[in-house]
Amino acid sequence: MSHSILRAPIVRGLFWAVVGFVLAAALVGGIRTAMGLDFWNTTVDWVIAYPVALLGWLMGVGVWPQWGREWLGGKAEPYALTGWQRYFGFSPDHKVIGIQYAVTFIVLFLLAGLAAMLIRIELAQPGLQLFTSDQYNAAMSFHGITMVAVAVATLLGGFGNYLVPLMIGARDMAFPRLNALSYWLVPPVAILLVIAVGMGGWDSGWTAYPPLSEVNKEGQVLFNLAVITFGVVSILGGINFLVTVTYMRAPGLTWFRLPIFVWGAISASLISFFFTQAFAAALLMVLLDRALGTSFFRASGGGSALLYEHIFWFYSHPAVYVMVLPGFGAALEILSHMSKKPLFAYRWAAGAMLGIVALSGIVWAHHMFTSGMDPALHAPFLVLTELISIPTGLIFLSALGTIWQGKLWLQTPMLFALAFVFNFLLGGVTGIYLADVPTDLHLHDTYFVVAHFHYTIVGGEIFALFAALYYWFPKFTGRMYSERLGKIHFWMMFLGFQLTFIPMFRVGIQGMNRRVADYPAAYGEYNLFISFAAFLLGASFLFFTWNMLASWFRGPAAAANPWRASTLEWQVSSPPPEHNFDEIPVITGDPYGYGGAGPAHNRPLGGLAAGSEGGS
Amino acid sequence: MTAAHSTVHGAEGHASPARLLRMNRMGLWLFFASDALVFALLLSARFYLDGLHTPPEVKQILGLVMTSILLLSSLTAYRAETAIEHGNIARGRSMLLLTAVMGSVFLAGVVMEWMLAEFSPGDGYGTAFFSMTGMHAGHVASGVLLLLMARRQASAGKFDGGGTRAWGASGIVMYWHFVDVVWVFFYPVLYLIH
Ligand SMILES: [Cu+2]
C-alpha cells in the first residue's frame, strides 16, 4: 500500500476540519472575551466555526490538491487512488461517486431504520417504556431527517450519477470535480446529525417549525447547519445533471429517445436546483434569529412563524418529487425491460414528469390548512393540489399499459417495481383526503398522515429504489445477487410494509396524534400489532444486507447484460470500463425497441454487447 | 436502441472548447437562478415582515455612495473581461484589481452602516436590513476573493491568448455582475420605498 493511513484523504479531511473548527472557535472566543461575553457560546461558535471546519474538510479530502491549486494559477494533481481505495477519496469518476452516494445513503437508511425500530418498541404499548419523551423526540427527529435525506439522494445521487452518463452515451458528468465536491459535502451532514444526537438531539422533527426551533436545545443549530449543507449538495447535483443531459448526449440521442430514468433525473434536478434553497434559507433565518437576534419568526419582534411554514413548504412539497420522480423513472424502466415491451405512452410519461415539476411549486399550502393562514387560500390550494393527480395518473397508466399483456419476468427487481405500482396507488388515493380541506382538518397531524406519506415515499420511492438496486447491482459490481435472498427480502418487506401502515390509516382516522411518545390506552392493540409488523419489515433488511455484502464479495460474475435490456448501460461490460465507451455510440432508435419485427431486445447492439447472453 | 460504431472520439470525452464554454455558461446561469431565489425570498420577507416601512434613520448618503461605487465596479469588471478576452492580460489584471478594491470599499461601507445603524436587528425592518445586506455582502466578499484569484491566474498565464481560454476570468466577472444586479433590487427596497 503506497499510502499510509495517516495520508488517507478522509484522515486529512478530518484533521483540517478539526484544525479549522478549533482556530475559528478560539478566534470567536477571543473576540467574545474582549467584549465581556462568555468564551464559549454553542450557537455562535457552531454557526461561525462550522463553515471554517467544512472548508478544512473539503480542502483536506482532496479539493486543494486536485482543484484548489488551479484557482491560484497552479497545476492540479490527477486523482491517484485505484482499486478499492478509489472509493475513499475525491474521485471525479461518476461511477465511483455514484457508488459512494449509494453506499453512504444505504448505511444511513439502515441507521435511520434502526431508529424507527426503537420508535416502534416505544410505541408498542401506551405509557413510556424505552425512552423519555425527550429521547423519543430525538429518535423521531433523527429518523425523519435522515430518511428524508436518504429519499432525496440515494436514487438521484447514487443511481443518477452512475447511470445517467452511461444511459446517454457520455464518458462522465459535465462537471466531474463539482460532482465529487457535492458528494464530499455529504459526510459532514451525517457527522453533524450524529453529533447533534450525541448532544441530546433536537425535538422539532425534520420540519423544524418555529417557534419551537428557535428556543429549543442546541442540537437544533447542528440540524440546521446539516440541512443547509445538504441543500448545497442537492443544488450542485441538480445543476450538474441538467448540463450533462443538455450537452453530453451521444449523437442521435434526441430528447425523446432518452430512457425514462433520465427523464426522472432531469425532472428531479429541475426541482432540486430551483427549490432546495428555500429550505436552506428558512433554516438560515432560524439561525439568524437564534444567533443574531433578528425576528423573522419571533412574534415578539414583529416576525411571523407562518412565514417559516410558507418558505419551508415551498421547498418541501416539491421535495417529495425529488424523491419520487427518479423512482418513477427507475420503476418504469424496469417494468418495460422486464415485460419485454416498449414503455407505454413514453412521451406522455416524460411530459407528465415535467407537468409534475411545473405544478409542484404552486401547491405548498396544502400542508397549512390548519395553520391559521388566510382561509381564502384554502380553495385555490385544494384545487391546485388535486390537479397533480392528472400527471401522476398518467404515469400510473403508463406503468399499467406497459405490463398489460406483457410476459412478466418476475425476478426480484420486477417484484419491487410491481409493488411500487400498487403502493403508489394507495399512497396517491389517500393523499386526496389530505388535499381536501374538510377531511384534512380532521386528519391533520394524525397517523393517517404518517401512513400516507410512508405509502408514497417508502411504498413508492423506496420500493423503486430497491427495484433499482437489484436491477443494476450486476452492472455496478460485476456480480450477481442471490435471487433467493432477494425474494425473501421482497416478500418480508412487502408484507411487513402493508401490515405496518394500513392499520396506521385506521388509528389516524380515530384521531391518534403523530410525533408523541405516549398515547391513550384505547389505541394500544393496534399499536402492538403495528410494532410487530414493523419488526417484520425491519428484519427484511437483514436478508437484504446479507445478500448485498455476500454477493458483492463472493457472488457469481455477472454478464454484461443479464436482463437482455436494450438501454446503453447494458451494452458495456459489468462493471463498465473506466471511460464507459471506447467509442461514443451513435443512437438510431428509441430505448425500448421490444416487439416489432424480430425481437430486438437480445440482438447484440453494434458489437458492443459481446458476451451479453446468459442471465441468472 | 441500436448502437453503432461511430467516428466520435476523444480522450477527454467529446466536448470541444466551444461546447465546454457553453456547458460552463449554462452551469453558471443555473447557479444564478438558484442563488437568485434566496435573494428573492429575503426580499419578499422584507415586505411580509415590515411592508413598505423604512425608518428615517437609514443613512441615505452612505447608501447612495456605496451603490454608486458598486455599479461603477461592474464597469471596471467589464473592461477587465474584454481586455483578457482580447489577450491584453496586463490591462485585465489592473482592472481586476481595481474592481476588487471597489468591492472592498463597498464592504467597508456595509461594516460602517452596521456600526452606525440606529435600529436593532430585532425589529421588522432591522431583520430585513441586516439579513439582506449581510447575505449580499457575503456574496460581494466571495466575489472580491474570486477577482483576486482571477488576477493571480492571469499572472500565471492561464488566460494567455484570450478567447475560450479566458472563461475562468469571464465566469468570475459574470458572477460580479450578478451580485451587482442583486443590489440594484435590494437598494431601492431597503432605502428608497416609503
Ligand atoms: Cu405537499
Image (cartoon, coloured by chain):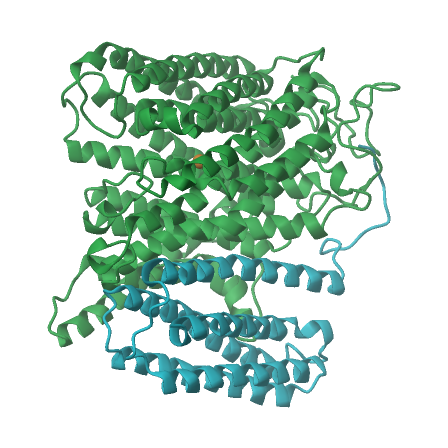
The residue lying furthest to the front in this view is A376
Q: Can residue A79 be seen in this view?
A: no
Quarter of the figure that contains the C terminus of chain A? top right
| Residue A93 located left or right of residue A64 | right
Which colour represents chain A? Answer: green
Quarter where residue A326 is shown: top right
Which quarter of the frame holds ligand 1?
Answer: top left
Position in image of residue A156 (x %, y %): 54, 40
Using residue A606 as the reference point, say whether residue A167 is left or right of it: left
**Residue A484 x, y percent position in the rendering:** 53, 12
The count of marks equals: 0
Taking depth in this image into account, of A470 and A203 the one nearest to the observer is A203
Q: Which residue lies furthest to the right in this view?
A: A597
- Who is closer to the viewer here, A533 or A13? A533
Q: Seen in the image, is A560 located left or right of residue A267?
A: right
> What color was chain B assigned in the picture?
cyan
Q: Which residue is drawn at 51% across and 22% down?
A: A424
Q: Where is residue B143 in the image (x, y as percent from the top left)?
A: 48, 74
Residue depicted at 52% across the width and 57% down the height: B34
Q: Which one is in front, A527 or A567?
A: A527
Please indicate, yes or no, whether residue A365 appears anywhere in the rendered image: yes
In percent of width and height, residue A66 lies at: 53, 62
Q: Which residue is drawn at 29% across and 38% down?
A: A205
The foreground one among A348 and A591 is A348
A312 versus B135 height, above or below: above
Name the residue located 52 percent from the left edge and 19 percent from the top edge.
Answer: A425
